[in-house]
Amino acid sequence: MITILCGGSRGDFQPYIALAQQLKKYKKEVRISGPKEFESFVTNYDIDYFPINVDISALNIDPKMLEKAGSADNPLKMLLAFNKMKAYGEYTTKEYYKACQNSELIIYHPGLTIGYFAAKELGIPSVLASPFPMHKTKEYLSVVMYGKSKPTMINKKLSYLMIQGMLWLAGKDSVKSFWKKQFGRLPKDFGAPYEHHNQSNQPALISCSNHIFERPADWNSHIHQKGYWFVEEKDDFKPDEALVDFIQAGEKPIYIGFGSMSMMKKHAELGELIVNAIRKSGKRAIICGFGRPDNLTDDIYALDSIPHTWLFNHVSAVCHHGGAGSSAAGFSAGIPSIIIPFSNDQFAWAHRSYDLGIGVKPINVKNLTVDNLANALISAFQPDLIAKAKAIGVKIQTEDGAKNCATVIIDLLEN
């Protein structure tokens, strides 16, 4: 049994589902472990699931803390939020450790370092699987500073100390506390494990296209970046007929959706702002995750959710929050990106798309207005931008990241 430890939002799970799908093609038993609320989402893809059940009220944790951690617009705010959730962290660490039992290999998200230490304790291999580049390199800034700071030699070094330190500190105390209670000692080699993935029985896998951030030449040979990991949707998916009719009724619409960011109460007014911006731009659009704003018009179609892999092939441009998964899907579709970053690594994908000439200049959500969003929707249709987005999309589609990374895992187990 291969166990994959995952956390975050729905978009965070998708690359790991894609990796699990490819491992199953090699006849491997594989399961994903994560919060209970994602169980049906994962099992819908015929992937086994080990739910982490957390009773927030019993642990006396303010639910707002979880929202603050997910919406932090800088690393310090994120760390301060996580620091106030130690009880939550210790409890989930205990549950994730249970999920590791009876496994032959552990794959873990960089925010869940319990996977690394559990694997060492159990005497089995561990694989770091990251949805973004995170290993030290002199070639570019890490995703927590890209687009925010000038890329100097010192800043590059600091940026990787920051991203690895942030991810490590988010779970360090939880692992430490759990391990002392469970074993009466600290784990072996207790410390940030990310740069320890430098041998064949302990590789690191990165879900990222080499046409977006090229694999750095100064990484060790056991860090594998072979393209994005895209979920294979079921063949029986059928979109709503009304949606198909809308798409076919005129020029291709723009997609606008901010994923889990739009679910936060402080962004409740975004739906109305977006509809007004669409109307001002004169474009047709599909909006997702905003309910049904009162000011909807016939040129705007509202829906709650839909697979990006299907929808992005039927729209002219994508406007979103810059989540790693949404960004990957938009880049792969070969259409212009309009990215409105809210927090964390979203700024990196927003600025990278702009630097590559496949997206418009990013707008921080704090500065979002009807006027600047309308202007961004219009500017996305510059011929040069459209051509560059299409060209990079073609290149990304030649990669097969999930399959090739699954092969790394199979070779590890067989050899």
Image: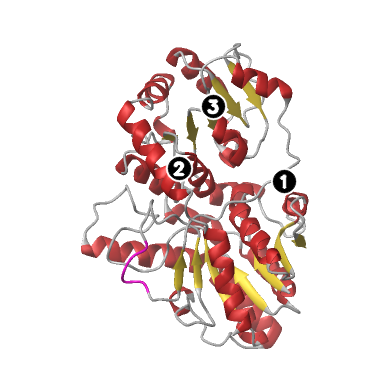
Amino acid found under the numbered disc labelled 3: Leu
Q: CA distance from mark 1 to mark 2?
A: 22 Å
The x, y position of residue 246, in whole percent, is 63, 18
As helix, strand or loop, the secondary structure at mark 3 comes to helix
Chain-order first, disc 3 or disc 1: 1
Amino acid found under the numbered disc labelled 1: Lys
Q: Quadrant of residue 240?
A: top right
Amino acid found under the numbered disc labelled 2: Phe
Q: Is residue 223 magenta?
A: no
As helix, strand or loop, the secondary structure at mark 2 comes to helix
Disc 2: CA contacts within 10 A as few (<14), some (14-19) or many (>=20): many
Classify residue 374 as left or right of residue 122: left
Q: Which quadrant holds the N terminus?
A: bottom right
Q: Which quadrant holds the C terminus?
A: bottom right
Residue under pointer 2? 331
Residue under pointer 3? 270
Q: Residue at x 38, y 25 (%)?
A: 381
As helix, strand or loop, the secondary structure at mark 1 comes to loop
The front one of 243 and 187 is: 243
Residue under pointer 1? 234
- The numbered dot on residue 10 is none
Q: Nearer the viewer, mark 3 or mark 1?
A: 1
The front one of 69 and 192 is: 192
Which residues are the magenta region? Answer: 215-219
The x, y position of residue 191, in whole percent, is 48, 79
Q: Residue at x 62, y 46 (%)?
A: 64
253 above or below 83? Answer: above
Q: CA distance from mark 2 to mark 3?
A: 24 Å
Chain-order first, disc 2 or disc 3: 3
Asked if residue 401 shows in the view, the reply is yes
